[in-house]
Amino acid sequence: MVAAFPAGARRAVIACLALAAAMLAAGGECAASSLRDRFDPVEVHGFLEVRAGGRIREDAHSKDASVLDLRVQCEASTQTDWAQFKLKQDIWHDGILGRVEGDTREAWMFLRPTDNLDLKLGRQVLTWGTGDLVFLNDLFPKDWQSFFIGRDDEYLKAPSDSVKASLFFDRLNVDLVLTPLFASDRFITGRYISYWDGSRGALTGGDAGLDYERPDRWAADAEYALRLYRSVGAFELAAYGYFGFWKNPGGADARGTAIFPRLHVYGASVRGPLAGGIANAEFAYYDSTEDRGGRNPGINNSELRYLVGYARELCRDCTGSVQYYVEQLLGYDSYAATFNGRRRRDEFRHVLTVQVSKLLMNQNLELAVSGYWSPSDADAYLRPRIVYKWTDDIRQEIGANIFTGDHLGTMFGQYRNNSNLYMALRYSF
């Protein structure tokens, strides 16, 4: 372990102090007895976990180990008669990087000023949309590095420092999210997973990781997200808007540095019962505002994205879902005319996903598998796992991330040398 905490751990300490200050201010008095009168008892939960995994194929750009984490998570929550408070903090030793890391997953205050208005202020994990591990209108940050190396599914969703306002009316409900400083995905940079570098025409990783420049001006580089939703009979209807930046690098500048161009997204979804299960459909238009014509090869073209899905119970304690997802690249002729790399994108990318989970042994054993297959890219990704609860407090997990593909330049094909097996043991308290 290192002697000094990195920036993530320092932010955790600051978040704890900020939450304590908010609680003191809400109490109005600094006496401990007064605080006890105003606040419910603090509930504390958490876990201690060890997680280790290794690659099943040799990768010249990465270590043989894929994940080596010794992690502790603590979650504290309390409330008054007018507000709720929550802090969730992770601290772990990362054996791949050889240092202590910290991440404040949640640090928020929840208020209900009126009967039709909710406010949530602070660091929070946000999500919406209808996809099952496929995201169209959910432009909140994801952590694909954690997902692909075998960390818990919880860590696919990364936190945002945001203000969320929810308004409730008879005919329509509204969610508004303001993130004052752009929060990108925690995307693949080469530190844990090698990837295809189109500019070099080769796999890369490790010390030759991605060089990028992220928008970092407070307020000027803010993000705004909107959801309008209502129920019509048994069906849930929603419309979405997003105004910010591409969540992963969406191009490169003249120096070859990866950049995040501005992006607007408009979409809609519907979900409801069908033939004994739940069906969903979702659509999104990705408006790449800095290159709407698609003539600038240094900026992503605009896209249309489509999703249809269906989920149902297959038998007792067994559920399954299937989804069909399409990405359509707009301005394709302009893109093809200016493309100068080694592998050009197809105009349409098709992906079929399947998720199945089965509970056994009085629901103490879970067998689950998630699969992605792209016939257009000729690649696939399989994520099987087995979870067993030894007791109410002790859980063991064994899983894998298997990548395959005919071409190194496709979404899953580029990660085929990163296929890995992992195991985790968790004690919850």
Image (cartoon, helix red, strand yellow):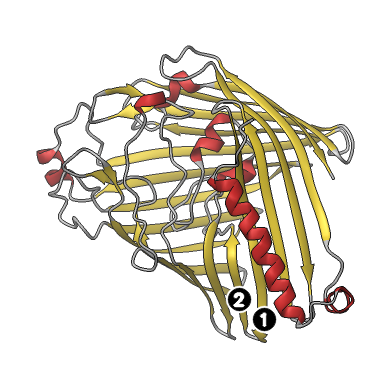
Quadrant in the picture for residue 415: top left
Residue at 71% x, 66% y is 20
- How far apart are labels 1 and 2 at the CA level? 6 Å
In the rendered structure, the answer to whether residue 92 lies left or right of residue 254 reads right
| Left or right: where 317 falls relative to 326 | right
The disc at residue 387 is none
Quadrant that contains the C terminus? top right
The residue labelled by disc 2 is: 119
Residue extending furthest front? Answer: 3
* 61 up-or-down from 82: above or below: above
Residue type beneath disc 2: Leu
400, 108: nearer the viewer: 108
Q: Amino acid at mark 1?
A: Arg
Q: Is residue 69 visible?
A: yes
Q: Residue at x 52, y 65 (%)?
A: 162
Identify whether 41 is placed above or below 205.
Answer: below
Relative to 422, say whether 319 is above or below: below
The foreground one among 34 and 410 is 34
Q: Quadrant of the N terminus?
A: top right
At 44% from the left and 15% from the top, the residue drawn is 59
Q: Which residue appears at 83% of the width and 74% of the height?
A: 39
Mark 1 vs 2: CB contact within 8 A: yes
The percent position of residue 279, horizontal first and vertical second, equals 56, 55
Q: Is residue 113 left or right of residue 61?
A: right
Q: Looking at the picture, how far across and down is residue 150, in whole percent?
A: 60, 31
Q: Along the polypeptide, which appears first: circle 1 or circle 2?
A: 1
Mark 2 residue element: strand
